[in-house]
Amino acid sequence: MLATFFLVSTVTAADHQVKMLNSGSDGYMVFEPAVLSVQLGDTVTFVATDMAHNSASIAGMIPDGAKPWYGKLSKDITVTFDTAGVYVYQCTPHAMMAMVGIINVGDNKANLTAIKAAAAKKKAGFVTNKDRLDNYLVQLD
């Protein structure tokens, strides 16, 4: 019975926090941390530190079979990551300002090439911080 307790306690998923901010270490309209690595089964809570932000996965920029999410403005949202791979997300009202972030789940980056191709299209819609997403993606190489 004691062995079961230790086995269960070592595989407990972790909860990580990402703040949604008007201003941070990477400039205006940012998520902190902007690039986060987690393990399969972990959760990430997006914290509405500053108002008028949300967190939403970007279609075509999450692993195949992964569950998308769309948080409400000015509300925290907790997402469980059950599919390995790279996820790119945004703040919907501030997407044009490149308010984006990346979560890498597990060691499988099989969708990274597809993410980089989609990023080229996505950043065409940025009016500021045009290199932000590329700078984040480089951190996964």
Image (spheres, rainbow, N blue to C red):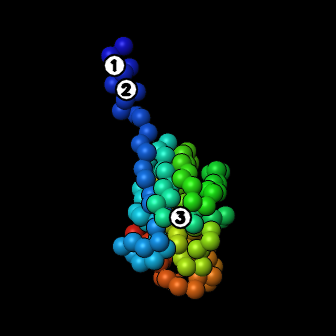
Residue type pointed to by label 3? Met
Q: Earlier in the sequence, mark 1 or mark 3?
A: 1
Which residue in the structure is indicated by mark 1?
Answer: 3
Circles 3 and 2: CB atoms closer than 8 Å:
no
For residue 117, what is the image quadrant?
bottom right
On the question of residue 87 being in view, the answer is: yes
On the question of residue 141 being in view, the answer is: no
Question: Residue 47's x, y, as percent?
Answer: 48, 56
The answer to which of 62 and 112 lies nearer the viewer is 62
Question: Residue 80's x, y, as percent?
Answer: 54, 45
The kind of secondary structure element at disc 2 is: helix
Question: Residue 39's x, y, as percent?
Answer: 44, 47
Residue type pointed to by label 2? Leu
Q: Which residue is pictured at 36% across the width and 13% down the height?
A: 1
The tag on residue 37 is none
**Left or right: 128, with 17 as reference point:** right
